[in-house]
Image (cartoon, helix red, strand yellow):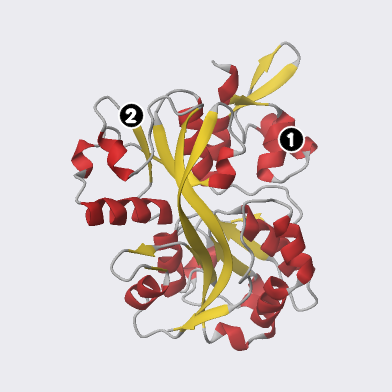
Amino acid sequence: MREESSLTPEEVASILKIAKNTVYELIKRGDLAAYRIGRKYRVDIRDVETYKNQGKKMERPYSNTLQLNESHPLQMKAQITPCSQGVVICGQDILLDILALHIEQHPHGTRTFRSYIGSFDGLSAVYQGKAHMTAIHLWDEDTGTYNIPYVRRLLPGIPMIIIHLACRMQGFYVAKENPKKIMDWNDLTQPGLRFINREKGSGTRVLLDERLHKLGVDRRLISGYEREEFSHLAVASTVGRGEADVALGNQKASFQVRNIDFVPLQKERYELAIKKEYLEKPLFQAVLEILQSSEFKTEIGGLGDYDLTETGRIIAET
């Protein structure tokens, strides 16, 4: 196994935002796959992604992890009562994990559950009453805008509030120094180029498909288009290991993976969709207060790669 594909327990703890001792406990219980080199543990970055996507509960101070499936008691109800059971937040960015921590610490807060699913699945969960809010970054080529057209189409007749979280840069992950000279969407059809895609329904996949359709690029000519991973970090690490030449994702993941460069393409709007009826409750007023607070913005700003100019602003009611 190449060194670039493995992580130390300290690096895993940093990615998952948990204590190093918790990582050792997960390994000991068999919840997180690992192997030894001498006396030291190493974890394959793909196993970290598998652990996150399985929705197992992590021992972190800010939230619990929730997989939205039929066996979970929260999903058995048509509606979830936020104050008595907790609030369910869908989306994959670490910004949401930090928001969950602030919600739990707020005087009007509650227990939080995190579901690491993409934009389409998150909107579906809100529509079905299985989640209270979801982060989305869905590009609409026809209008040249993010998110609002999708909320109107996918949640018909339901009054919704869209709150701005941050702007992020989307672009290509490529090998160090970009040996294939990949600079724009048309380059994806280069003969012999190996692509690794995001899953259907993710905002990144929607951006790719919308741009290809607009440019008239035949996706069938992209080698690896059908090959999927379920996070920015997973596709970036695939490029870093040399198992693909290019992938699409946000800039932040490129800082966490060795041996890759980032080619910026488009600034995206990352936003939070909430049913308007929820916003009348003290808990969701607390969410708005947190997003608009200087403390929250300072903490997020310290992570880098976020434009927080409009954070906490209600940008649409549908």
The N terminus: image quadrant: top right
Q: Position of residue 145 (x, y in %)?
A: 39, 69
Residue at image location 47% in from the left, 50% down from the top? 170
- Characterize the local packing of mark 1: few (<14), some (14-19) or many (20 or more) Cα atoms within 10 angstroms: some
Q: Position of residue 277 (x, y in %)?
A: 53, 87
Residue 165 as seen in the image, left or right of residue 245 = right
Question: Which of labels 1 and 2 is toward the front?
Answer: 2
Residue 128 visible at all: no
Q: Is residue 83 above or below residue 227?
A: below
Q: Is residue 172 above or below residue 42?
A: below
Task: Tell whether label 2 touches label 1 (CB within 8 Å).
Answer: no
Distance (Cα) linking label 1 and label 2: 37 Å
Report helix, strand or loop for mark 1: helix
Report helix, strand or loop for mark 2: loop
Residue 2 as seen in the image, left or right of residue 25 = left
Residue 138 as seen in the image, left or right of residue 310 = left
Residue at image location 46% in from the left, 30% down from the top? 238
Which residue is tagged 2? 194
Residue 266 visible at all: yes
Front in this rendered view, residue 129 or 303 = 303
Residue furthest out toward the top: 38
Q: Which amino acid type is marked by label 1?
A: Glu
**Mark carried by residue 25:** 1
The C terminus: image quadrant: bottom left
Q: Position of residue 193 (x, y in %)?
A: 31, 28
Q: Which amino acid type is marked by label 2?
A: Arg
Front in this rendered view, residue 228 or 183 = 183
